[in-house]
Each structure stands twice: as C-alpha cells, then as structure tokens.
Amino acid sequence: MNDTIAAISTSQGVGAIAIVRVSGPEAIEIVNKIFKGKDLSQVESHTINYGKIIDKRGNMIDEVLVTIMKAPKTFTKEDIVEINTHGGIAPTNKVLEELLINGCRLAEPGEFTKRAFLNGRIDLIEAESIMDMINAKTQAQREMAANGINGKVSDLINKLRDDMIQIISNINVNIDYPEYDDVDIITNDIMIPKIVNLKEKVKKILDESKNGLIIKEGIKTSIIGRPNVGKSSLLNALLQEDKAIVTDIAGTTRDIVEGQISINGIILNMIDTAGIRETEDKIEAIGVEKSLKTMEESDLVLFVLNNNEELTEDVEKLLNKLENRNYIIIINKIDLDNKLDLSKVNINKDNIVKMSIVNNQGIDELKEKIINMFNLSQIETKDPTYLSNTRSISILQKCLNSIEEVEKGLNNNMPIDMIELDIRNIWEQLGEINGSTYEEELLDEMFSRFCLGK
C-alpha cells in the first residue's frame, strides 16, 4: 500500500458530474501536476478547490472541483483527492488517463475499501455492509446496511469475543498462578454455565440472521403447477404487469420467467416455471425438469391448482413432498365448478388460499399469508441488526458447533487446560468474522466483488 491508486468512483455514462478518486501517499502531489488553480499542497484539508485539469501541453481537459482530504481523517486513512468532473465518458476517462500517466496505479475492484480495512478504519463486517448499502433496493436493506456500517453488527461479535477472553483469562490465571488463594478456582462445574450462556447468545444471533438473509437476498419464490392452472397469470397479477405470456395453449411457458415484488419492504424473487406434465416435446421437457429443480431450491413454493380440474397422480406426489418446505397451495379458478379433491393429500389446510386470478380475487389474502409465514411484519418493524453475509453466518455456525463440543467435553470432565485451547480456537474463529484474524486470500476474494472505485 505504498503506491497511489486512482479509479472512477461513479457509474460511467452521461450525467451531471463524475468523480475520480485518488488515494495514497502521493495523491495530492500527483493531482497537483495536472491541476491549474491553487497549489493543492498548500490548501487546508477537507476543502473544495476550483480549477482545471490540463494535459502536459497545457490544454484544458475539463473544468473541475477538487476535494482535498488529508490523512488520517479520510476513508482510507491515506491522503485522498476527489476530482469532480463533468459526467461524460470522454472527460472522465481522460482525467483518469492523466493521473495514470503521472504516477497513479489503476485501483483494483474494492481496493479503496480494502485499504480502509487494512489501515484499521473499518472491520470486515463494516466493509461488507458498505457493499450492501451500494446494492440496497429497499428501505429494510438500507437500514440493515447502515447498522453494519455504524458498527452495531460488529458489536454483536465483539461482545462474544469479550465474553470468551474473560473465560480464557480466568482459566489462565488458575493454570499459571495456582498458589494464589484469592483467585477463584475454575472447575468444570463453574465453566458449564458460562459455556451454555455463550452458546445461547450465539444461537440467538444465528436465529436472527435468518431475518438478515431474508432482508438482503429476499425470498426465492417458485410458482409451480400443471399447465393452464394460472401460474403466469399469478405472476402477472403480483407484478402488476404482463411479464409472462398467458394463453390457453398448454406448454406456453417453456422456460422460467422471473420478476420481483416487495412485500413489507422484503423482496420476493418470483419465478414462473413451465407447467409440470409428461411431454414428448424435448424443449418443454427441459422446462419441466428446470421447474422441479427450482422447486427444490426455493424458499417458498406457490403451488397452483385448478379448482375445475381433478387432481392427477403426478401432482399428488409433488404435493406430498412439500411437507418440510415453506409452501402455499393456491386453488385458482374458484369462479368455476369445483372438481378438485385434496382429501388424499397430506397438506396443511392453513396453507391454502382460494383465488380467482382473472377476477383479481385472493391476491391480498396471498400476500397476508406470506407476511405471516415469514414474520415480515416483525422484520419490518424491528431494528435490523443482523448478520446477513453467508460467509459470516457459516463461520458463526462452525463456532456454535465447536462450543457444543466444548460443552460435551466439560460434561465428560475433560481437563480444563484442554478446554482452554478449544475456547481460544473459537475466539480466533470469531475473529475471522470481523477481520481481527484473516487470510490474504479471503480479502482478495471478498473485495474483488466490490465495484471499481469503491
């Protein structure tokens, strides 16, 4: 990090302004070479300065505003210069080109944020939350990302680590200074309640992290059923647009059709699938196979049945597979004569919604059913301080497994010095979540997913 990096930090295209960001020990010096105006080395930190960017021949490239921010009170804790240019592709790229000619290196994706982490400005949870803020599409996603950026989520992990270091310290005092009479002797009986308390705290964070994943990634929702039961009509009704083609011809939908809706600030990633039936049409058969795979991978299955159609054996088998899944059975076309008999199927009757999609009947009831199934009202009103990154959640789950092993060891009278080693390993694992301990490969992989210039 001894070099100086530069990148365009705004989306490239036509706009009012664009920002070219520079960070590093020579940031001010390099920009000063191509800036015509005040001597930037002499201006106060955190000031905006008017001038022009010029090439080596003295020709003006663009009229700009240059913001000077001197270390350490900057995002990267290095000197940072931000050049506000007119928002065209040509002038922005030309300014960046001049910076590279004069000594800057083109920043890698996410390198500004990576430097902020390596310089101690933020931890890994805060870094991931910055990316979540950039990608936020709903108010709930924005609020959760904000809690990550301001350190509320990091505090959850820091408190766990503080509890563990207290346990480790108590054990070490017993091991290193057994002759001290005024030190409480740490026995397995004393340790068990401490470990159980720690386990419950980790479980609580993991349970609530499910809400975090729902807020961040949404609910993957597949619409499943036989041809002509109203799957595409349901998708169109929920999206309030004609996204999917609707006809009376069986097999019209041969591939998945996707769309998104927001319910109580939570995204539902809707997938309309091909009608499930036996077919000799190779293309349609591939679509049916995709439908079954999508059903298996979904967080929520909306299984659409035709009220005017008898239950077929293949659909009956699929319905019986829903037992351990989140599902809602939609009985469509209730405006027609009833021929559907669900008495032979093992389904929860509370998960049934009767609809007439063509008459816009039952849509609100379906949404209410989804809200209750995923507790979306609670998620919306509660302060969203959750782990929401798969990496963090998987590490915390490993920690929980290790804590449960420690609990078993204590109950089996494992020596306390062996227990101390296990607890210390868990403490280090927790450090991987916020970046107190990390591997370089992890950082490279994580920050490579950031946009260029951030």
Image (tube, helix red, strand yellow):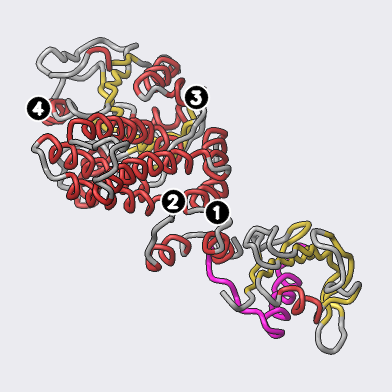
Whether pointer 4 and pointer 1 mark residues with C-beta atoms closer than 8 Å, the reply is: no
Q: Is residue 394 visible?
A: no
Which portion, as a residue range, is magenta? 86-110
Earlier sequence position, callout 2 versus callout 1: 1
State how far apart marks 3 and 1 are (Cα).
25 Å
Whether pointer 3 and pointer 2 mark residues with C-beta atoms closer than 8 Å, the reply is: no
Vertical position of residue 171 compared to residue 38: above or below: above
On the image, numbered disc 1 is attached to which residue?
A: 122
Type of the residue with mark 3: Lys
On the image, numbered disc 3 is attached to which residue?
A: 382
Whether pointer 3 and pointer 4 mark residues with C-beta atoms closer than 8 Å, the reply is: no
Type of the residue with mark 4: Glu
Whether pointer 3 and pointer 1 mark residues with C-beta atoms closer than 8 Å, the reply is: no
Earlier sequence position, callout 4 versus callout 1: 1
Viewer-nearest of labels 3 and 2? Answer: 2
Q: Looking at the picture, how far across and down is residue 156, in whole percent?
A: 44, 38
